[in-house]
Image (spheres, rainbow, N blue to C red):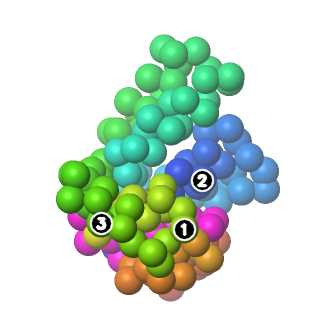
Amino acid sequence: MVILIDTNVMLDYFIPRQPHADVASDILHLCFERKCDGYMAAHSFTNIFYILRKRFSAGERKRLLLELCEFIGVAGIQRKQIVEALADENFDDFEDRLQLECAGKVNADYIVTRNVSDFSSSPIPAIVPEDFLQTMAL
């Protein structure tokens, strides 16, 4: 199973935002144990690094993200995908459309996000973290 983990789920883990932090931790644990292949969009790293600046020093943020890179893959995109995302009238949220492009690059089975409604026109199914955990338990 290949998943792209949306920025909001990663922030649930790092901040930690309740009541979502435990579920986010469980998903990362599945990736760490190689029970699924987890990826993050490359631009999620810059977003997370910036958002966590009020909680952690630059060195701490670098360490946290380096540790994450030990078991989470990075999905990147090129100019072509950015242009396609900008031109897509089915997505209002540009960042979510970039998440979709990154998910496509790694042939993700799911985009794990708390913003499922933002992916209503996505060819890759979006799933909330709790439902993903239930899918993995089957």
Give the alpha-carbon distance from disc 3 to disc 2, as whole Å: 23 Å
The residue at the point 38 percent across, 30 percent down is: 66
Q: Earlier in the sequence, mark 1 or mark 2?
A: 2
- Badge 1 crowding class, 10 Å Cα cut-off, few under 14, some 14 to 19, many 20 or more, is few
Q: Earlier in the sequence, mark 1 or mark 3?
A: 3
* Secondary structure at numbered mark 3: helix
* Region of the chain picked out in magenta, as a range: 105-115
Q: Is residue 66 left or right of residue 9?
A: left
Residue 30 on image: x %, y %: 46, 59
| Quadrant of residue 134 within the rendered picture | bottom right
Give the alpha-carbon distance from disc 1 to disc 3, as whole Å: 13 Å
Residue 56 on image: x %, y %: 62, 21
- Front one among 116 and 84: 84
Is residue 86 magenta-colored? no
- From this viewpoint, is residue 64 visible? yes
Residue designated by label 3: 84
The residue at the point 30 percent across, 66 percent down is: 84
